[in-house]
Image (cartoon, grey):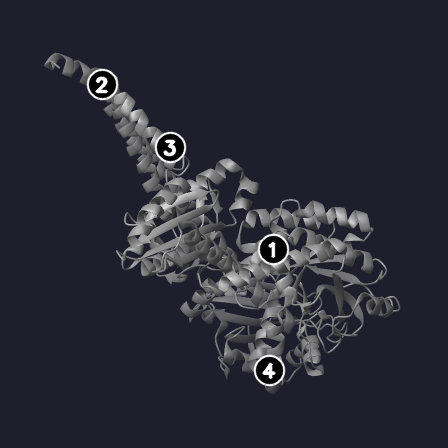
Amino acid sequence: MSNRRTRRFGLSIVLPILIACAGAIGLAADLITSVSNGANIADHDRTREVAQSAIASSVEQLANTIADNANWDDAALNLYAKDIDQAFAASAWGGPSETGVNYDVVIAVDGNGQVLTAYHAGKSFSPDVELYFKGGLKGLIARLPSDALEFKTAASVLATAEGPAIVAAGNLVPTTTGLVPADTPGRYLVFAKFLTPEFIAEIGQTFVIEDFHTEPSAARAFFTVTDIFGNPVMHLAWTDRRPGDLSNRAISPKAWSIILYLIVVMLAIAWLCYHEVRQVEERQTQSHYQATHDGLSGLPNRMRLMQYLEETSSDTKRGDGGLTITFVDLDGFKSVNDTYGHETGDRLIAAVSAGFAALAGPAALLARLGGDEFAVVHRGSRAAEDARALAQRIIQFLAEPFNLDGRAISVGASIGIADCPAEAIEVCEILRRADVAMYQAKLAGHGGAAVYSPEMDGNHLGRRALAADLKADLAAGRLRLAYQPIVDAKSHRACAVEALIRWDRAGHGPVRPDLVVTVAEQFGLIDELGTFVLATACRAARQWPEIRLAVNISPAQFRNPAFVATVASVLQETGFTARRLELEVTETHLIDQPQRVRQSMDRIRALGVSIALDDFGSGHSSVANLRQFQFDRLKVDRSLVAGITADLGGQTLLQATILLANSFDLRVTAEGVETEEQAILLNLAGCDLLQGYYFSQAIDAAAAHALFATAPETAAA
């Protein structure tokens, strides 16, 4: 080719292609950066809103505490008396101020600001309130009535001589009318809780704000707290999570791979325009690539995996190194497709594939088997160790949500690992073992890994047989329900029941209820089982007009988009009153797809059905979930109930839980009540309903009918 033809080819083909590639690279870099920064800014703004709500909640909590103490007959009698009983003040407020649990300082003043009694950290003191509160208390008290007739509270963050503090004040008003003469000048009770670094950090832990702390400079702060006059009192900051950076790291490799692939293809097209012979060769290469690779992710497909295993398994049999295969199945991917559509699901697969490829590295073969299943092959003397380490990296990688178009989408993974033994073994057997281990990981709970062992084959076959019997008995109506009464905490009268599944497997005896649910979820029977429980319970409870019905809901049911329609259909078919039905969910329902969960809860509540948060206090319990999801009832876990008779700490923890529920306007049920002492303490602590063996074990439908059909008329809880 002459120099002229070379220059002409370069100017007409190569130069435009290079310009287009450079533009694409610049556009991709700008897009990735914009998306990352946008996600970081949005997360920072959400955290600021949470921080503001956290401080406001703390102020409101202290205001509620002052309300309990100022609107009190004993307090009014003593503090309006001519000679104040200082021993009463020391007992009522001085002692609690020493612990600092609710407040650090308590001061009682008259309308002129004269101190009647005051305690700081359990010790009496005589402050100049004007100087101590730097003039702020006067403005707070000015918002309160000047007499003992109408009760009111006021609370704010104020600057004090000992640093920023939440200050709440209330005029002393007896609950009994006429106890204090109407023309009596008002006196006031004041509580202060110092906003120490430790207390700020505690608020951060409660509201899931990482490294929540004070800043001396407003320039470095994210949020400034002001007093009732609008004056800045303290500056707060935290450590941003920066989810956009994670998305950037996850998406960037795939994006740059696509750009690189585009450059290669465009240069290949230019070269093919000049060499017709190479065009045929390139088409052949491309056809082979498409046959052995997944079109969505660009990863090797099942065909290429089988080829690779056939090539490498013979080396393993000769003793040329170890071989380990890892199966990865995404948990929750189907719900992403159902909720956001297949286009978003495809983008999620692309992002997950890019992340897996980066984690696996070039030494391992990563293949997409189809749908949401992947396989990784490791070779060499460290194959087993590398596979187990990769499994943990994948679990950690999927612990953070993916950001797609502003949506935080979370998926998990169940991982099965199979090591190729030294003896001869077929490729299909290696894959089968990894698949069995993966299903074992699913049974143990989402987000885990399992290594194949021969015992798993027996477990897998046993579960299949159990599922077959369950399906047959469910179709034949041989399952039954038991009902455990729930009583009013004060009168101990039965006012509700919880429906519980019972199954006597022919030839085997009773099957644990949790195993019934697990097998139903694994083998696709959970919707049928859940509908059976709900419909059977509604038909039975329809005969008990004064009794509410509680039914547990499986996470798999709650993730089904048709679940709300199923509930509505059962209510219509059975004629059961929706307001008497309460569905119990655990916090595991709330972790995946919180937006979808909120939508489902709103639709269920629109039917008239209430929703309870079950097992609160068992393991992870998030105050953020109570704020984010509007529940009607909170069921305290039996582990908290069992601890109230063990020590004072157990009682304190229970009381704090009930106070927390009250702050969210939630009614409270305590589970696992087994003694009279527990029942008394739970009633005193503020529980509405009680449930446990002390009152009754679960009874069959006939016994329940005999009990509830003759139960005294009482208001439903």
Residue 244's place in the image compared with 7, above or below, is below
Mark 4 against mark 2, which lies toward the viewer?
2
Say which quarter of the image contains residue 533. Answer: bottom right
| Screen quadrant of the C terminus | bottom right
| Mark number displayed over residue 330 | none
Residue, disc 2: 275
Sequence-wise, which precedes: disc 4 or disc 1? 4
Q: Amino acid at mark 3?
A: Gln
Mark 4, secondary structure of its residue: helix
Residue 614 showing in the rendered view: no
Residue at the far right in the pictured view = 710
**How many other residues sit within 10 Å of disc 1, few (<14), some (14-19) or many (≥20)?**
some
Q: Amino acid at mark 2?
A: His
Image-based side of 630 in relation to 287, left or right: right
Residue 521: numbered disc: 1
- Which amino acid, by three-letter code, is at mark 1? Glu
Mark 4 lies on residue: 89
- Mark 4 or mark 2: name the one nearer the start of the chain: 4
Could you give the CA–CA distance between mark 4 and mark 2, rounded to whole angstroms? 99 Å
Cβ–Cβ under 8 Å for marks 2 and 3: no
Residue 224 lies in what quarter of the image? Answer: bottom left
Check contact, mark 4 vs mark 3: CB within 8 A.
no
* Residue 93 spot, x, y in % from top left: 57, 79
Q: Secondary structure at mark 3?
A: helix
Mark nearest the camera among 1 and 2 is: 2
Q: Which quadrant: the N terminus?
A: top left
Task: Identify the mark at residue 290; answer none if there is no mark.
Answer: 3
